[in-house]
């Protein structure tokens, strides 16, 4: 058995570490030659996960053709690049486990739908949950949702990743698992704004709760199950990402709350804050489904420079009072 991990950023590297701990051959594909060199020579990803010693059994490559003999692939590129990278894979129907969190901007498609258009026959799974890469790579405990229609295949994939500190929970709700991860990144930007503007912990808790109401409205409209949205890939990841400056999305929001522009904050980032790319497409898809998402709309306006952080907060607080139900 040989597992391929496509994407040598922080999360792909952490997942390669999880996979290699199971004793299986693990190949990590990275775009950057520096990543390939540092993983192979120093057993460290100096660009994206510096300071964390990697399992020496992980082998890195810069050539997608080397993944031709892998019998399953974890796809861990940023959401907006997933399609082009899958298109460049050697053509075979091996199971794909999608690990990015986002919605494709140019089509409004969820990532499992993008992958399905490119691989009509092979199994497609979604792995998502509260998982800061540096913690997972260091062997700290976490649990994730592994969603796939074919449960027997799901069990096989689960058993190749599960370890004493990494607990995948199986689900058949592929859309639900994906929606939680995509939406929480946008909400984490909003929570970062609360931090940047020093609006207090009550405000952050209120935003998480009302953000979860938005995630649930959107998810139910798009076919997700409520227990998935309330599980690891939804509420679990929302709470994590909305509570920690370790989150790239939260830290982007904090900068916006401090009055910096999105362009300024994104200019010299090497790492990805997916919420910035997901927010506009999420809003478009929500509008088309008649789903009201005021927090996501405020994040969109702020990212686009259409309002200041103060105006975004004032508008949210001035909305008509209503009953609490979703
Ligand atoms: N870092 C985490 O803690 C974490 C945890 C769970 C899920 N994720 C998700 O995993 C995905 C990857 O994030 P990450 O944190 O590993 O990335 P990262 O921010 O650590 O690194 C950026 C990655 O983007 C890649 N990239 C940049 N331009 C590209 C292009 N044109 N084509 C292909 N790849 C390109 C880089 O090579 C690098 O691998 C994202 O969707 C993210 O939301 C991240
Ligand atoms: O750093 P973020 O905001 O991309 O969050 C990373 C993971 O998605 C947390 O589960």
Image: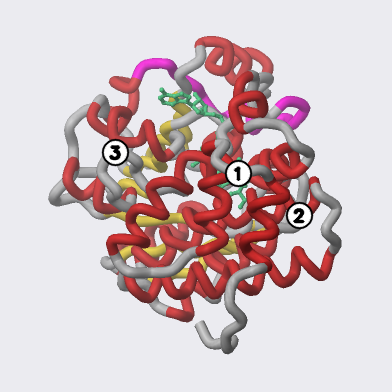
Q: Which residue is drawn at the image coordinates 41% and 54% (left, top)?
A: 283
Residue on which disc 3 sits: 106
Q: Which callout, 2 or 3, points at the residue further toward the start of the chain? A: 3
Q: Can residue 43 be seen in this view?
A: no
Quadrant location of residue 150? bottom left
Residue 113 pos. (x, y %): 25, 52
Q: Mark 1 points at which residue?
A: 307
* Residue 212 visible in the snapshot: yes
Label 2 and label 3: CA atoms lie apart by 30 Å
In the image, residue 299 above or below residue 118: below
Q: Is mark 2 within 8 Å of ligand 2?
A: no
Residue 54 belongs to magenta span: yes
> Where are the magenta residues, as a range?
50-63
Pick whichever of labels 3 and 1 is earlier in the sequence.
Answer: 3
Mark 2 Cα-neighbour bin, 10 Å: few <14, some 14–19, many ≥20:
many
Q: Where is residue 112 in the image (x, y as percent from the top left)?
A: 30, 52
At mark 3, the secondary structure is loop
Q: Does the magenta stretch include residue 137?
A: no
Q: How many discs mark residues in the rendered view?
A: 3
Label of residue 194 in the image: 2
Say which of 271 and 256 sits in front. Answer: 256
In the displayed structure, 40 sits above or below 81; it is above
Residue drawn at (45%, 38%) of the image: 76
State whether label 3 is within 8 Å of ligand 1: no
Q: Which of marks 2 and 1 is in front?
A: 1
As drawn, the label of residue 239 is none
Q: Distance between the residues labelled 3 and 1?
A: 24 Å
């Amino acid at each position: 058995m040989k597992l391929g991990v496509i994407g040598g950023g922080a999360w792909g590297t952490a997942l390669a570490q999880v996979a290699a701990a199971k004793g299986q051959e693990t190949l990590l594909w990275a775009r950057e030659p520096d990543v390939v060199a540092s993983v192979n020579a120093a057993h460290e990803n100096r660009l994206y996960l510096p300071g964390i010693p990697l399992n020496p059994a992980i082998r890195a490559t810069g050539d997608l053709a080397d993944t031709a003999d892998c019998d399953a692939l974890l796809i861990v590129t940023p959401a907006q690049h997933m399609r082009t990278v899958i298109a460049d894979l050697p053509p075979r129907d091996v199971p794909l486990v999608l690990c990015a969190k986002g919605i494709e901007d140019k089509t409004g498609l969820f990532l499992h739908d993008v992958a399905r258009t490119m691989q009509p026959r092979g199994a497609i799974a979604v792995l998502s949950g509260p998982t800061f890469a540096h913690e997972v790579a260091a062997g700290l405990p976490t649990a994730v949702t592994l969603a796939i229609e074919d449960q027997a295949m799901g069990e096989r994939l689960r058993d190749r990743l599960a370890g004493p500190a990494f607990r995948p929970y199986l689900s058949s709700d592929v859309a639900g698992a994906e929606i939680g991860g995509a939406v929480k990144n946008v909400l984490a930007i909003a929570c970062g704004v609360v931090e940047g503007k020093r609006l207090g912990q009550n405000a952050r808790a209120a935003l998480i709760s009302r953000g979860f109401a938005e995630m649930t409205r959107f998810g139910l409209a798009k076919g997700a199950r409520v227990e998935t949205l309330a599980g690891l890939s939804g509420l679990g990841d929302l709470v994590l990402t909305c509570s920690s400056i370790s989150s790239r999305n939260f830290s982007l929001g904090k900068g916006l709350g401090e009055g910096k522009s999105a362009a300024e904050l994104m200019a010299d980032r090497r790492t990805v804050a997916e919420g910035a790319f997901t927010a506009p497409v999420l809003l478009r898809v929500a509008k088309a489904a008649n789903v009201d998402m005021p927090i996501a709309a405020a994040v969109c306006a702020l990212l686009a420079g259409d309002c200041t952080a103060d105006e975004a907060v004032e508008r949210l607080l001035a909305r008509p009072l209503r009953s609490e139900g979703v």
